[in-house]
Image (cartoon, grey):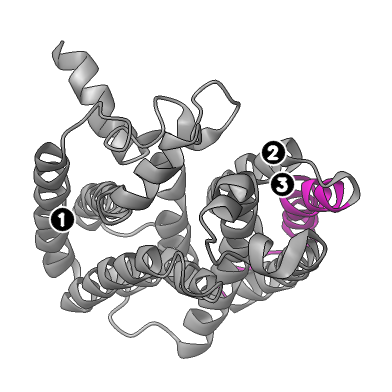
Amino acid sequence: MVQHRLKLFFALSRTPHALIDMSAPALAALLCLGHFPPLPVTIIGIVTVFAGYTAVYALNDIVDLRADRLKVGIGGYRDDENYLDGVIIRHPMAKGALGLGAGLAWAVGWALIALAGAFWLNPVCVYLFATGCLLESLYCKLWRVTPLRALINGAVKTLGAIAAAYAVNPSPPILFLALLFLWLFMWEVGGQNIPNDWTDIEEDRHFKAQTIPVRLGLHRATLLIVTCLVLALFLNLAVLWASPLRFGGVYLLPAVAINIFLLLRPAFLLGYRRQRNDAMALFNKASYYPLAVLGLVLARLAF
């Protein structure tokens, strides 16, 4: 019973996906610093990142509860699909498997841990975490207002990485931060946000939601996806160039390959076939993108 209950909380925070997303702050910290941070910073950083992602993902479901219930009511958010966010159960509160009070307590508890860790690492991280929570709430509230909410979501996904840079370097280079922000922003919008909205397009049309696929159509949505992910490729190389680490051709070629196989190839397949399953496949593969680049950086540090 306790194990099942815990799974529901992990489902609320999309923990399988969040654990993969945690690679982005780790990646940012290593690229900014050029070497491994001290052990206390590493340990507190890991706990803080886990707490922060757990809280923010839960916050999304709490703020979006009404909209999620509407989608569930017409058969949306099925759990029998090959979708990373549905490894356990998608939106357990909307499906009645978890109460709102329990979800709030879970989110607040992890948020307090995240705030304590962020303050210990660097008070700037506290402001970045609070900004992320506010922007995530605003993003959810704009579901029926404007497709430009995708820009807010792109910014939210970069804040964890930006905070990680400040956690290991009190004054990170502005150029590095700008390139890091733009790189992860393009990856999130093109590889996560738009494909995710594509998978929910029927439900979103039913409720007149203002998402990019609904508002601009699938052709323009595809063009935006491809444009963002092509830019992500070049920005990825720019971030590697701006890092104190030095990446020769032996590492740049694998970096290009990661972009092609996890981002560009599934994006072009989606544009060619325009099937919901292809949007889901792009979302799933793009989710592993920061983790793959982190593996490349760890290889560079090791050798």
Say which element carries label 3. helix
The label number, if any, that marks residue 111 in the structure image: 1
Q: Can you name the residue that lies furthest to the right here?
A: 272
Q: Which residue is mark 2?
A: 281
Task: Please name which of the two marks, 1 or 3, marks the residue nearer to the observer.
Answer: 1
The answer to whether 140 is drawn above or below residue 275 in the figure is: below
Residue 22 image offset from top left, x and y in percent: 40, 49
Residue 157 image offset from top left, x and y in percent: 44, 63
Q: Which residue is mark 3?
A: 262
Q: Place residue 133 in its image quadrant.
A: bottom left
Depth check, front residue: 99 or 87: 99
Task: Please name which of the two marks, 2 or 1, marks the residue nearer to the observer.
Answer: 2
Residue drawn 17% across the image and 41% down it: 103
How many angstroms separate mark 2 from mark 1 (CA)?
31 Å
Q: Is residue 302 left or right of residue 240?
A: left
Residue 89 image offset from top left, x and y in percent: 39, 27
- Residues in magenta, as a range: 243-271
Q: Is residue 126 left or right of residue 236?
A: left
Asked if the residue at tag 1 contacts the one at tag 2, i.e. Cβ–Cβ closer than 8 Å, the answer is: no
The answer to whether 270 is drawn above or below residue 16 in the figure is: below
Mark 3 belongs to which amino acid? Answer: Leu
Mark 2 belongs to which amino acid? Answer: Ala
Residue 118 image offset from top left, x and y in percent: 18, 65
Does residue 100 appear in the picture of this structure?
yes
User: Badge 2: few (under 14), some or many (20 or more) residues near its Cα, within 10 Å?
Assistant: many
Mark 1 belongs to which amino acid? Answer: Ala
Residue drawn 65% across the image and 61% down it: 214
Identify the image quadrant of the N terminus.
top left
Say which element carries label 2. helix
Q: Can you name the residue that lies furthest to the top here?
A: 1
Asked if the residue at tag 3 contacts the one at tag 1, i.e. Cβ–Cβ closer than 8 Å, the answer is: no
